[in-house]
Image (tube, rainbow, N blue to C red):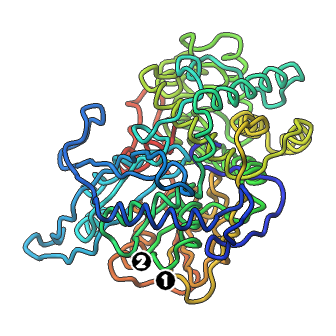
Amino acid sequence: MKAAALYSAAGSLLLTTLAAAPADSAPGAPGTAAEARGTAVAAARARAAGVDFGTCSAEQDAPAGLRCGTVSVPLDYAHPDGRQIALTVSRVRATQKDPHNSKLKVRRQGALVFNPGGPGASGLYFPVIGVLPEWRRIAAAYDLIGYAPRGVGRSAPLSCQDPAHFYKGPAQAPTHPSASYKQERIAQAKAYARGCAERTGSALQYYNSLNNARDLDVLRAALGEDKLTFMGASYGTYFGALYAALFPAHVRRMVLDSAVNPDPAQIWYRANLDQSAAFENRWTDFREWIARHDDVYGLGSTPEQVRVSYEQARARLSAEPADGKVGPGQLQGAFLTAGYYDDLWPSRAEALSAYLKGDAEPLVGIAAPVAGTAAEAENANAVYTAVECNDAPWPTDWAVWDRDNTRLARVAPFETWDNVWANLPCAYWRAPRQQPLDVRTGPGELPPTLILAGERDAAAPYAGALEMNRRLAGSVLVTERDAGTHGIAGGSNPCVNAHLEAYLLEGRVPGRHAACAPRPEPRPKAPGGRAEQQSPRDTLKGKAERA
């Protein structure tokens, strides 16, 4: 689903790396010699041009200290002298001050580039995260770099439909949809795929993960870095891994936070099924937590009783949407975000409890569509769809989708069908498809990389981190045990942060595997109290991921 970027294509495709691709590779192969040459040409130009950082535009509403610029990349790397697009880049310079003793000077280690995932998420606000205590030592040593990937925001933005028609409520979200409802959603998926093709034309095919990896190398060169220090979260781990496979000699240090499964067989249809199954487990975790706090929320003392309370709210919202805006679809969306971030559990439980007691205001506050964010949300969805659909073959026969997901929904009803509707335009896609790159690096080809993962992460199931660890020789996996928050770097777990700092600041890694105890569970909050606020860390780092 959107934000986690974990949808996979059928078929196991073991393919060669870019460096091994012959000059006459067939169209759609993961990398041609022409694209390799084009990337080198674009990187050389970018190094010569640099990035002219200045004031960020008014619409970016940039905090003090954040500077913005652009980097030019080819739309099509096979033709580097053809159409160029500009990627918007942001920076906060390294403070070079020890956060514990401002009189001590810290050695600058270059630029740390971050991508928050998606596809479709922007990292432009990432650099201001350096003001948070968990990030100050890293911000002292590195220029923090964010950017909007191709298609996102001001970086040659994509759109597939009028935002006014994309982002609205109320909506239904049946866990076992009828045949007529399925036909309605098929028609919508076909219209959306058609809109993407008509609005973007032949350029649509160039919005894909391989080009995101190539763009990263051009950005590295524009920043004047001989080697890249990169942190990717969620989907950012996938094209970070592509970068590692395509440009291993250009990697200095790489952090892959909440790693997705890079197996070509998982890109992207099959991981869709894995993710839906994993969200059912997280939904159970959440209901167990609510049940343990029945004295606060009154939603049931067992997970099954909590589920019944949730279904009562769904039925009531189906008959009469809250404030005319929040239906079952909006309820499900609000509770899905709690599957990503357990610090949202109290606000969701509070809103459900209040709603069932007659007060809809908390639920409307967390679940109602916000008209002012419609354009941003539609853009993020357009990029997500384009990248995922372009990256790999998808089943084009509805019967395959219907069969696989009907079976899955019998045991994992919470998210399965909404996950289908988010991805179904790929069945009717009109642009050429890529073949997934077989991500692998041999011993000594790549510096040690740091992989971070929550053991119960639903957006990026833990099996993906294990597979990433196997495929990147010399990589190290740090696991937050029995925890499911999506994106754990620089968060509330001191053990995880200690590994992150040791790696980024000193290049030290533990053995091939290391484990951290889970973060504390969130504290319950009684209904009627002040609404829970999103943490500053999540505001800065996770804003786009929660689209």
Amino acid bearing label 2: Arg
User: Which quarter of the figure is the N terminus placed in?
Assistant: top right
User: Which of disc 2 and disc 1 is earlier in sequence?
Assistant: 2
Where is 240 relative to 152, above or below?
below
Residue 414 appears in view: no
Q: Residues within 10 Å of mark 2 (few under 14, many from 20)?
A: some
Q: Which mark is residue 540?
A: none
Q: Which image quadrant for residue 456?
A: bottom right
Residue at the far left: name it. 103
Rounded to the nearest angstrom, the CA distance separating label 1 from label 2 is 7 Å
Residue 306 appears in view: yes
- At 59% from the left edge and 73% from the top edge, which residue is drawn? 245
Q: In this rendering, would 6 be left or right of 243?
A: right
Q: Are marks 1 and 2 in contact (CB under 8 Å)?
A: yes
Q: In this rendering, would 40 be left or right of 27?
A: left
Q: Which image quadrant for residue 86?
A: top left
Q: Which residue is mark 1?
A: 447
Q: Which mark is residue 252?
A: 2
Coordinates of residue 233 in the picture (x, y in percent): 50, 58
Q: Residues within 10 Å of mark 1 (few under 14, many from 20)?
A: many
- At 43% from the left edge and 45% from the top edge, which residue is drawn? 85
Amino acid bearing label 1: Pro
Where is 229 relative to 216, above or below?
below
Coordinates of residue 152 in the picture (x, y in percent): 47, 41
Report the front residue among 82 and 275: 82
